[in-house]
Image: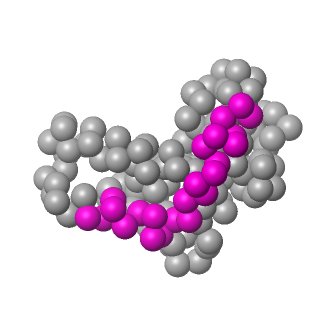
Amino acid sequence: MIIDASVATKWFLPEEGSDVALSLVATERLRAPPLLLAEVGDALWKKFRRGELHEQFDLLARHADLDQIVEIVEDAASALATRALELALMLDHAIYDCVYLALAEADDDVLVTSDDAFRLKVERTSLARFIRALGT
């Protein structure tokens, strides 16, 4: 199962869907491109900067352990870059999200996301079998 940053971020922040996201850790083999580490870090930085998080050192330690929870597919970034750009152009959507979709497609796997706007775009295409909402 491929997960994106919208799911992994829920492991750090108590928000809607956090319980479902945490349950995946215990029940699934989770994989993601290296981009996941930067995207989760960026989401945490934004929350910290806005004063929504106050546990700076705890967050740093937990973020450092992220690759122990999710298998990071190291070769995915360069190998999938062209396909991700094709998907971004086709879907009219940010390439960052399309990297995860390209990995799911390449591995004939499913991307689990809580990004409903992205999921709905993908579901309207022939790639619908590669994506599903968190909790379904």
Image quadrant holding the C terminus, namely bottom right
Considering depth in this image, is 30 or 125 the residue closer to the camera? 30
Viewer can see residue 103: yes
The residue under the point 41% across, 45% down is 38
Q: In this view, does 101 lie above or below 88?
A: below
The residue under the point 60% across, 43% down is 77
The boundaries of the magenta stretch are: 61-83
Q: Is residue 50 above or below residue 89?
A: below
Image quadrant holding the N terminus, namely bottom right
The residue under the point 86% across, 37% down is 126
Kindly indicate the quadrant of the structure image that contains residue 78. Answer: top right
Image coordinates for residue 74, horizontal then vertical, percent: 58, 54
Disc tally is: 0
Kindly indicate the quadrant of the structure image that contains residue 80. Answer: top right
Is 107 left, or right, of 13 in this rendering?
A: right
Image coordinates for residue 33, horizontal then vertical, percent: 58, 51
Image coordinates for residue 119, horizontal then vertical, percent: 65, 40
Judged by its main secondary structure, the magenta piece is: helix
Query: Which colour assignment does the render follow?
Result: one colour
Give the residue furthest to the right: 126
The residue under the point 58% across, 37% down is 97
Is 71 left, or right, of 47 in this rendering?
A: right
Residue 67 in the magenta stretch? The answer is: yes
Viewer can see residue 132: no
Is 39 left, or right, of 90 in this rendering?
A: left
Considering depth in this image, is 56 or 11 the residue closer to the camera? 56
Image coordinates for residue 123, horizontal then vertical, percent: 75, 39
Residue 33 in the magenta stretch? The answer is: no
